Image: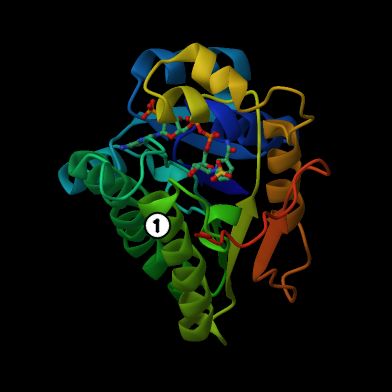
Amino acid sequence: MIVFITGASAGFGAEMARTFVGHGHQVVISGRRQDRLDALAAELGELALPLVMDVTDKASINEALSLLPQSWRQVDVLINNAGLALGTQPAHEAPLADWETMIATNCTGLVTMTRALLPAMVARGSGLIINLGSVAGAYPYPGGNVYGATKAFVDQFTLNLRADLVGTGVRATNLAPGLCGGTEFSNVRFKGDDAAAAKVYEGTVPLTAKDIAQTAYWIATLPPHINVNSIEMMPTCQGFGPFAIKRV
Ligand code: NDP
Ligand code: 8X3
């Protein structure tokens, strides 16, 4: 298989690259940080191809895709993993610029990549798109505002892809994890505040990037007649909050 992973310079994406390459597949590892991609490519060898791109920038995507060598162009699996949360402020205090960045990355970037690679999959009659959603797309929490909304978009976009792709042989999955540690996600969310990021995982046994990578690999290696529409995963220590009721 040829697997194209966005956001492979860290976290889930890097671990998914290790998993797919470990099973002998070719993996395009993309992201903005060339040094991180080069280091991962050096670790993984010639089955990994680093490709610098910013999913929020259409020109950057088009240029990167035009650089793909011929033998790497028939992408079987696109994993739209690049994404981020910024901040946990309430809606009336959150910076609009943070909201715009989340929408540009988690929604616009994801649909741009999908639109770029999907037609060739449909023409070949096979392919798979795995979109990284989140439990935040299904359940609201204070401060989740636009991040959760972008992940709800990912969930519904994936289902609507399924509606369009029935009969084409192309599959689509929303992979929606809950609390997952050991990645840069919380450092990004708290803008480099390591203490705030570490606090998120205090006293927990969170999911790991390896758990997510193994799940993505399982989805991608199921027989072609099986489409996993959506998978929601949480660590056992995570559950649901009660409704908030303001009493006077
Ligand atoms: P990380 O922050 O560790 O990794 C995010 C990756 O996305 C990095 O490789 C980063 O690379 C890339 N990225 C960010 N912005 C862009 C951009 N504009 N263009 C290209 N690449 C970009 O996060 P995780 O691995 O934890 O998360 C991966 C995905 O999973 C995200 O979509 C996240 O929302 C989702 N998720 C995470 C959970 C968690 O608890 N960790 C739980 C549920 C879902 P670079 O900076 O080099 O561009
Ligand atoms: C990441 C999970 O709970 O931090 O998508 O929103 S959460």
Left or right, 103 with reference to 125? left
Name above or below for residue 88 compared with residue 247: above
Question: Residue 49: horizontal and vertical position, in percent?
Answer: 47, 29
> From where the camera sits, is residue 40 visible?
yes
Q: In which quarter of the view is residue 43 placed?
A: top right
Looking at the picture, does residue 10 appear above or below residue 242? above
Q: Amino acid at mark 1?
A: Thr
Q: Secondary structure at mark 1?
A: helix
Residue lying at 69% horizontally and 42% vertically, measured from the top left? 212
| Identity of the residue drawn at 29% across and 56% down | 108
Residue at 48% across / 49% down in the picture? 142
Q: Position of residue 96 (x, y in %)?
A: 19, 45
Q: Is residue 165 above or below residue 172?
A: below
Where is residue 113 shown, x and y percent of the image?
35, 54
Residue 134 visible here = no
Left or right: where does residue 115 sit relative to residue 189? left
How far across and how far down the image is residue 147, in percent? 41, 50
Query: Dot 1, crowdedness within 10 Å: few (<14), some or many (≥20)?
Result: many
In the depicted view, which residue is nearer to us: 32 or 71?
32
State the scheme by which the image is colored: rainbow
Name the residue located 72 percent from the left edge and 47 percent from the top edge.
217
Residue closer to the observer: 60 or 156: 156
Report which residue position mark 1 lands on: 150
